[in-house]
Amino acid sequence: MYQIDFNKPVRTHFIGIGGISMSGLAMILVQRGFPVSGSDSKRSELTDKLEAQGIPVIIGQKAENITDDIELTVYTAAVHEGNPEFDEAVRRGGPVLSRAELLGQVMANYQTSIAVSGTHGKTTTTSMVTEILLAGGMDPTVTLGGMLDTIGGNLRLGNSGLFVAEACEYTNSFHHFYPDIAVILNIREDHLDFFKNLENIRASFLRFAQNVPEGGMIVIDSGIEDFEKLMAPVACRLCTVGKRPEDDYRAADLRYDEDGRASFTVLEKATGESYPMSLSVPGVHNVGNALAAIAVGRRLGLPMEAIARGLKHFSGTHRRFEKKGVLGGIKIIDDYAHHPDEIKATLETARVCWPGWVVCIFQPHTYTRTKRLFDGFARELSQADVVVLADIYAAREADTLGVSSKQLADRLRELGTEAYYFPSFDEILNFLLENSMNGDMLITMGAGDIDIVADKLLGK
């Protein structure tokens, strides 16, 4: 694999520069003095932001975008053989790196690196860690998979040796990372267009964990099935967070306010002491995320007072139970949940903080995930009072695998849940405007573009 010399900047071109991680990496290289350009299939808020920073972005991917002066090409996971730019870069024989390979090399260039992994909760927990570090007076570089208002987007360029990033398991991307501190929030079935089964996923997480050096630390949720057996080959220290009395960090005296935001006492095993914590984001799942972030902060030597300030300041990232507005007494929420476990957590949060009807407007994400987890989707969606389904968001897939949102609506009705399927956003919008009542909560949900419906409801 080509190795970057960060002391010798080279002209670098990003294929798919508008991706949330790719845009952050591009800015990191610019900070290091690299001349950077990029291309993407369509214009977006992120491509506009990059251009505002002086980075040339070409809309439309074609072979002639790979010019003679390009010394390194970086490509995103959605780009592969058959993409004209990718094929031209390979044909020319110059160095080519995947997004994950570049991120791994960037991470290795910092004195202390933190990588947050897990099937769910990565963006939220990475954001919590970021808030804690800032409250503690640290100056980290951070790359996020979402937008955090505190740092003005998905990237923070720091001037210290501290680097914080999300670590995604898809295509084994995180195998390229060698963090000093790794967080493993959960290990569940997902990305089944790549992984064969849960055991395959567990093996991938083990491989990632084995990249942590012996003097490093893994923060892991003790609720992960047989985690001790899974992590047995790991040489570094395990720090557990969860509900067991023997866990290094656990929560007691858990209570919620009227908006579903938790307050609790964190118990630290090593000191035998307890500290009060209050979150500004709703949901029981965020207590677990907070415990992991607390463990990272303590590993870096931060006092609990600073950690508490950081967690209190964190008001959420965009599309994570994000309150979009209120329309005629109807509360409109948008959420990124696209896996049964995430749907469960989101609907549990809604039940904690909302006494009225909960209407879930769900857009399944990828045919593979919908087919493999079909029963799980039906089971968890049935916890809503009403479910409105949009067509499956294909993302990188072309084959429908014979599965559809209409089939999911049929299954929900078999389970006794009021469910509807509409093939267009306009039909969904009209249905909601005609049938929603004062006291309802509407949650647009999914990893695609279903948030457009929430914006249109509010006239945005």
Image (spheres, rainbow, N blue to C red):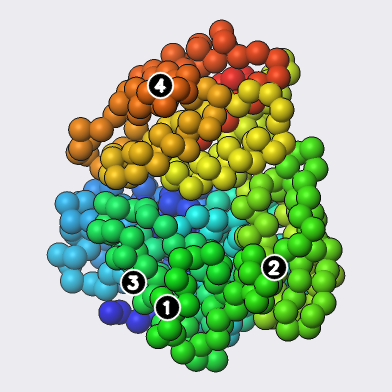
* Residue depth check, mark 3 versus mark 2: number of the one nearer the observer: 2
Mark earlier in primary sequence (3, 2): 3
- In x, y percent, where is residue 311? 75, 60
- Which one is nearer the viewer's eye here, 380 or 11? 380
- Say what secondary structure mark 1 lies in: helix
Mark earlier in primary sequence (2, 4): 2
- In x, y percent, where is residue 169? 39, 63
- Give the distance between the C-alpha atoms of the residues marked 2 and 4, in whole angstroms: 39 Å
* Residue depth check, mark 3 versus mark 1: number of the one nearer the observer: 1
- Give the distance between the C-alpha atoms of the residues marked 4 and 1, in whole angstroms: 41 Å
Quarter of the N terminus within the rendering: bottom left
* Residue depth check, mark 4 versus mark 3: number of the one nearer the observer: 4
- Say what secondary structure mark 3 lies in: helix
Residue position marked by numbered label 1 in the rendering: 229
Residue position marked by numbered label 3 in the rendering: 203
Residue 226 visible in the shown view: yes
Q: Which mark is residue 413?
A: 4
Which of the 4 image quadrants contains residue 310? bottom right
- Give the distance between the C-alpha atoms of the residues marked 3 and 1, in whole angstroms: 12 Å
> For the point 76% across and 55% down, which residue is it?
254
Left/right of residue 246 with respect to residue 100 in the rendered view: right
Q: Are marks 4 and 1 in contact (CB under 8 Å)?
A: no
Amino acid residing under circle 1: Lys
- Which one is nearer the viewer's eye here, 51 or 180? 180
Amino acid residing under circle 4: Arg
- Give the distance between the C-alpha atoms of the residues marked 1 and 2, in whole angstroms: 21 Å
> For the point 54% across and 29% down, which residue is it?
384
> For the point 65% across and 54% down, which residue is it?
286
- In x, y percent, where is residue 457? 59, 20
Label 4 crowd (10 A; few <14 / some 14-19 / many >=20): some
- Which one is nearer the viewer's eye here, 89 or 322? 322
Q: Which mark is residue 250?
A: 2
